[in-house]
Image: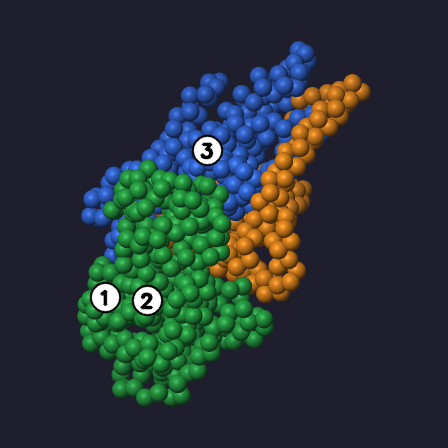
Amino acid sequence: MDAVFQNLDLIRQGFTTTITLTLLSAMGALVLGTLIAAMRVSPVPPLRWTGGFYVQVVRNTPLTVVFFFFVFGLPEVGIVVGFYPFAVMALTVYTASFVAEAVRSGINSVPVGQAEASRSVGMTFTQTLGVIVLPQALRSVIPPLASVFIALLKNTSIAFAFGVFEGTSASNVLINRFGSQVLQILLITALVYLALALLMSAAFGWLERAVAITR
Amino acid sequence: MTSVLYDVAGPRTRQRILVWSLVGSAVIVALLVVAALRLADNGQFEADKYTPFFEEPALWRGIARALRATLQAAAYALVLATILGVLLAVGRMSHSQWLRLPSIGVIEFFRGVPLLLLIFFFFLGFPLAFGVNLPALWALVFGLTLYNGAVIAEIIRAGVHALPLGQTEAALAIGLTRGQTMRSVLLPQAFRIMLPALISQLVVLLKDTSLGFVIGYVELLRYGQRAAEQLDNRIQLTVVVAAIYIVINLSLSRLATWIESRQRRVAAPGTHVEEVTEAVGRQG
Amino acid sequence: MMRTRVALVAGAAAAALVLAACGGDEDGETAAPDVTAEESPEFEAGTTMAELAEAGQMTIGTKFDQPLFGLADLEGVPQGFDVEIAKLIAAQLGITEDNIEWVETVSANREPFLEQGRVDMVVATYTINEERDKVVDFAGPYYVAGQDILVPAGNPDGVEGPEDLAGLRVCSVSGSTPAENIRTNYAEANLVEFDAYTDCLEALLNGQVDNMTTDNVILSGYVSENPDEVELVGNPFTEEPYGIGVPESEDKVFCEWVNDTLNELYEDGSWAEAFEATVGEVIEETPEPPATGSCETPGAA
């Protein structure tokens, strides 16, 4: 246990990065994913195709491969940013495909009458989707989104192999320094992730209740 | 739902869509050209980045070996995770607290911890704790088993819950015990409607085998990166590796969708097939 | 029981290696000298040497991603100076190349592998240091490197030594001695860690990091590959004696034997031959081999 308690700073530093990485990528993925879901239900065929292609390709690629493309591919086309922004991009792009699927099934869960009514009072596609359907869809999408974002939290650990110092990197540094305490170090790291995941699911539970309609 | 969001486009709208599609495509093509020019500047289109694919039979042999390693890890993990999943699911649905609560604990723990840590545990921690060596393959397989076993347990639970209540009632009414009801009535039916969800989980599992690269298990991704060190064509090799993953996973996803649509037609009345599929496919 | 299982696995792996070797590259890019194994050497019964010679096969841990020292080829077989040294030592036990099972060791798992007896010895740019010596025995050193810094051509940041790294993005491999050295002794530097040195090199070439640091001999390899893009600061600030790790034992017999063997390799010229065929590609002058230390207090020679 000493290994961990004497190095709390290192652990805190690592997990601070884990948290910011998760929050930034979650926001990015929410925006990009909703946009892609909207594309997939839009009246414009090329947009539908693009959205469908994106989801199919990205969902079926390992996150580690996505990371490789961002960290070592983008510099080849002259885009060089830090490792942290690259990690945010890779996580955003990957997670967005799951957000898009969740949002799309949310859109399908909104009663058809809602869209019919909004269309019959003369709203356009954009208005129907943006003002009537999506707000209701997002409500039913909260539980699946919670799973997606908890997966995202766990996935940030992959950034450790791509130049980002986060929670798993911190634990790895300690394992290298205190080889005999591997078990304790791994257990404590796991518990921190678990605590963050529980916190996140509590936050989503609160959100779900806050936006629930009382009938 | 999607059909009521908008009217079928009239001639003017169709024209507008066409124009904007062309403009959009032009922008995308322009971006691709810029990217291609930059890649060319960096020598990414030079012949020696591609010739190894044609002139090095060793490369394709290596890729085949690495693919086999990937599939092997995924296959072992799938079998073990399914067994673990059934045990955990039965435990979680049990009426005894002594089985239910630990099962819930185990499921939630392994679902909430990064897979990477589970793999590290089997690679570095397990030998220290139990004095048993695990080759990288098994460290990867066991890590995958714990995580996917927990997820599969939840799939099975969703599958059992999706069955009409009448199935349980009828089974109990003819005098079967709870255990017999689960074994001979509920699980066999649940397995059938779970099949698509299980296949989707296999996609997740297959993607996660790529984490083996951190512990030196030479699967597809690691082999690709290592070969790139010899051949100096990392981008090209990563594209090839990604394409292999996508083709396999896309085929599996298609298979899942096909089975699901078939089951919507043949499942017992009152079965909520879609609930099972929705219970998964959300984890990255 | 355990032994049989390991032997079986080793046998299978050896068979795979033979197959791989048959399909190997005929153009013979690596001009590694042929190593001939000793025929049925005699050892005192009960020693590690006798056991290994009896088994006729051994498991050796080495790097698979370290150019010049241990780098896997397309068939997955490692090549380099470490590999040659390991082959030469195995040959003294009567073990031929075909009967060596190569296991990839990464910086983070070398000690656990030895402690758990997963490998019989580790030859993997393995720096002898006090902390490691507590859990494993070190023979050698068989080479002495020093930590140095690789910078973009022209040295735009004017780096002369590790003190100048403050505020710069320095790349190294997680778990390696050089990375730990920077983290503990030059905390002002902004350390970026990757899984392999080639990842660092790439990041350096495309400007994602300002420089990278590890042992000079590894960096020299990168300079020879990219002479127009990178240069070596050329001011080694540590001494990294590479040792051969063997499982810890009370009597140190195996460790001493490896030391004696190394000295034989120094004398009969095979050490120099191995060096020239591998590291010699980038370092023209073959150095004098370092004096081996004692197995009790290694590196103290």
Q: Which mark is residue C76?
A: none
Dot 2 falls on a residue whose secondary structure is strand
* C20 or A63, nearer to the observer: C20
Disc 3: which residue: A25
* B275 or B244, nearer to the observer: B244
Chain drawn in orange = B
Q: Is residue A193 left or right of residue B218?
A: left
Counting from the top left corner in percent of width and height, residue A62 is at 52, 47
- For marks 2 and 1, the one nearer the N-term is 2
Colour for chain C in the figure: green
Q: Chain of mark 1?
A: C
State whether residue A193 appears in this view: no
* Residue type pointed to by label 3: Ser
Colour for chain A in the figure: blue
Which is more foreground, mark 3 or mark 1? Answer: 1
Q: Which mark is residue C299?
A: 1
Which is more foreground, mark 3 or mark 2? Answer: 2
Disc 2: which residue: C143
Residue in view at x 34 percent, y 72 percent: C120
Compared with A167, C42 (above or below) is: below
Rounded to the nearest angstrom, the CA distance separating label 3 from label 2 is: 46 Å
Q: Chain of mark 2?
A: C
